[in-house]
Amino acid sequence: MPELTSYTKDTESNILANPPTADGQLAFATDTYKFYISDGTNWRSYQANKVYGNYSVSESSVVSSPPLFHFDASDSSTVLNGSDSQPSNGDGVASITCKATGKKMISDFATEQPTYVSATGTPIMGETTGDARIGGLNTLQFDGAQMLAYDYNGQTAFNRFAGFTGIAVFRAAVSSGNSSGWNPVFGGAVASGPSFIVRDLYDYASARMYISGAAVSRSFSSAGLAADFAQNNPTLVVLRTAVNKSTYVQLLDFNVNNTQVTDTTSANYASSLLTLQGMMLGAQGNFKAITQRFHGEIGEFLFFDSMFNNSAVNTVANYLASKWGLNWSDL
């Protein structure tokens, strides 16, 4: 086996533009997370992160790894009411199936089932004219007491990873009725799991990440978005977090009513992996009591166990923006 003669970190295009000059050279692509090993005259590539084969969110948008969770309220074939049938407008949703894995998020109790609202359904969240939907598509309505969960107690769904990407299309009602003001859109079933929460009590977005039970919040009240959230406007959010042995980095990119904001933060952290146990829509580990859940509409949600680069984010976000009648400015 040849000995390592040199190690390079660069973008994939720069690496491939410069063929190796000797055996034993190693290069790592910082944008695509591929390792390249020299055979003397050519680079041979190896993927550094998980690859499950291609997962297609549409015919024109392909990412390399399928999501752990992908729930799409607009696809009525994946949504079931309490009679295990495709729901009609106004039905309670007993389960919704992940389009990538076949996992189901369920609601065991009828009183906790979100409402299936068809594209021509009765307006909700204060509208008086026009369709109530996001982009004229079917959605799930949560009134502050509903939720769907895969493994509610976080007992069997266990995954460890060095980063994640959560992407959601939703509208959050300004007043959830939750006295804390925290309005959870999605999150793991246990307290230490990743999540995205809007703090509607103060009309601003706050991304909250839990690491080993400690909450790290980022407020966007200073980003000029208070007025946008105060109007129950449609939102496309991308929350990305990466962790290494000493520092985690969190990026939040979202478009609220076609106003786009990006935020980056980092902090000290003493572990190398995150743990995900269970997943919820309309709730998360710290806010899943019957009075602590999401108030608003959720259209589509994807969760990946890796931190996407900008190119992958743009692929999925542009697909969702086009589908749900939203705009997305490439990162």
Image: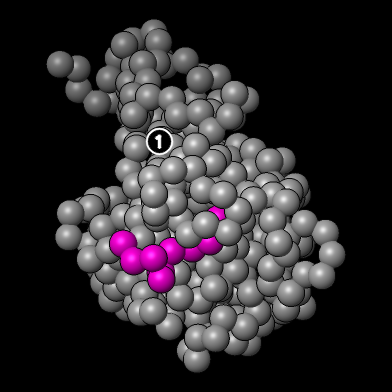
Residue 163: x and y in percent read 37, 53
Question: What range of the chain is rendered magenta?
Answer: 108-116
Q: Is residue 317 visible?
A: no
Identify which amino acid the numbered label 1 is placed on.
Answer: Ala
Residue 222: x and y in percent read 69, 80
Q: Which residue appears at 50% of the width and 20% of the height?
A: 16
Q: Nearer the viewer, residue 305 or 249?
A: 305
> Residue 149, located in which quarter of the rendered image?
bottom left
Q: In the rendered view, tell whether residue 279 sits above or below residue 181.
A: above
* 315 relative position to 182: left or right: right
> Residue 9, located in which quarter of the rendered image?
top left
* 223 relative position to 57: left or right: right
Image quadrant containing the N terminus: top left
Q: Which residue is mark 1?
A: 100
Q: Nearer the viewer, residue 127 or 13?
A: 127
**For residue 113: magenta?**
yes
Q: Which residue appears at 26% of the width and 58% of the height?
A: 151
Q: Nearer the viewer, residue 118 or 165?
A: 118
Q: Which residue appears at 43% of the width and 80% of the height?
A: 292
Q: Which residue appears at 51% of the width and 28% of the height?
A: 56
Residue 152: x and y in percent read 27, 63
> Residue 131, located in which quarter of the rendered image?
bottom right
Residue 23: x and y in percent read 30, 14
